[in-house]
Image: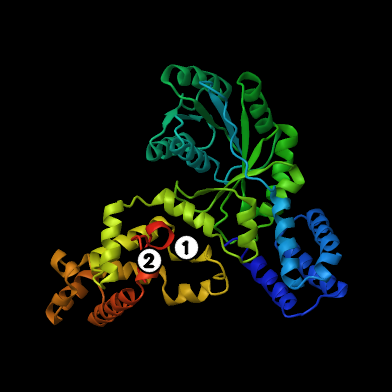
Amino acid sequence: MAFESLTDKLQNVFKNLRSKGRLTEEDVKAALKEVKMALLEADVNFKVVKQFVKAVEERAVGVDVMNGLNPGQMVIKIVNEEMVTLMGSETTEIQMQPGKSITVIMMCGLQGAGKTTTTAKIAGKLKLKGKKPLLVACDIYRPAAIKQLQINGEKQEVDVFSMGEHHNPVDIAKASMEHAGKNGHNVVILDTAGRLHIDEDMMMELQNIKANVEVHQTLLVVDAMTGQDAVNVAKEFDEKVGIDGVVLSKMDGDTRGGAALSVKAVTGKPILYVGMGEKLSDLEQFYPDRMASRILGMGDVLTLIDKVQANLDIDEGKEKEMAARMKKGKFDFNDYLESMKQMKKMGGLSSIMGMMPGMGKQLGDMESMVDEKQLSRMEAIVLSMTLAERENPKLLNLSRKSRIARGAGVDIAVVNRFVKQFEQSQKMMKQLPGMMGGKKGRGMFGGMKFPF
């Protein structure tokens, strides 16, 4: 995951600071030297690192910190605040045109950055906000680019405008505006062509589109896994075409995260979204303060709550009924399946635990204890049961368990162990009604119950 190495290094630095009763100026400088090295290793722009460390040091060696009751915590607070400032302080939204005017968004970027997928993701976000977007296929060069946009548009239930591969992208963009006006679309998103590297032809094409169509927002998609190259690409696109914001794709990959910490400081352009997976729903609004919390190992509960509210469609009455059963220890295998379904919508166990405060260090251990494959096997076991068996686990005798094991493709010992663990969970839930159900029948994080 992004920032994992950086987070671990910063956690060690802060641990040393907390262990000291009082901090001297030498303590602060020694700690910031380690912070500097950690940021450089995370591929943060060296000029940005220099300015960041200087800003932290100027505040951290001040009287307020030196005489504070907990100077270690004060330094961490300052690092957090300066990191937020570095990434833009405020969350930036796509600026929409007022009234019934059509907002035109031009998407650009290099090949392989995930531009076409990101285009469809943004369309889905805007649709959820009540907009009626139109995706426009202006990439006439890359094989299957138009088809990819059409497939993604269909998945998002968003219209796609295409004129095939034999028309000029400028003409396609102009025709799409007329189509949008006739069909009531209030957002037009142009998916333009990328190249393997920046060249004059690509830049000229983007400039020609902007010269012939009034583009209100130009968004650049860059691959977060390319580190400093992503920042350099953003800078060059801004100088030659002009961009209004950046979308960082592949932030869920094994990336050091330097691009997220450098883009705003180097280009002056805000990060609007970050791509956190391949699914069309895996696009998060970029919140500088929340990202800083993740980097410093403080978790991101607010984003977790947002994901729950956005992805979970729980019937209020059904939820209260489930909570009541939990209090009585009557949580059955149907409830377990519902919990599994909810967790999958959230991105799986690792995604959930990664946003929990203080779980960064323990995440690896948690994943080894309860991996996604193990959860899938558990689900297969439940799906191999009859409806009666799911509702009443006491029916599970030896012959039934043997049949379930064959259906799930596992050994009967696995079924026995799972059923035993489930019975223990039932007892635990009966003992902990406050945590799992609450006085008003609400579960953790707005009703979400985890299957473990």
For residue 72, above or below residue 135: below
Residue type at numbered disc 1: Ile
**Closer to the camera, 85 or 431?**
431
The N terminus: image quadrant? bottom right
Q: Position of residue 78 (x, y in %)?
A: 75, 61
Residue type at numbered disc 2: Phe
Q: Position of residue 124 (x, y in %)?
A: 45, 39
**Closer to the camera, 335 or 224?**
335
Q: Are marks 2 and 1 in contact (CB under 8 Å)?
A: yes
Say which residue label 1 marks: 352
Callout 2: few (<14), some (14-19), or many (20+) C-alpha neighbours within 10 Å?
A: some
Say whether residue 348 is left or right of residue 386.
right
Say which residue label 2 marks: 450
**Closer to the camera, 87 or 221?**
87
Q: Residue at x 73, y 52 (%)?
A: 86
User: Is tag 2's residue or tag 1's residue first in the polypeptide sequence?
Assistant: 1
The C terminus: image quadrant? bottom left
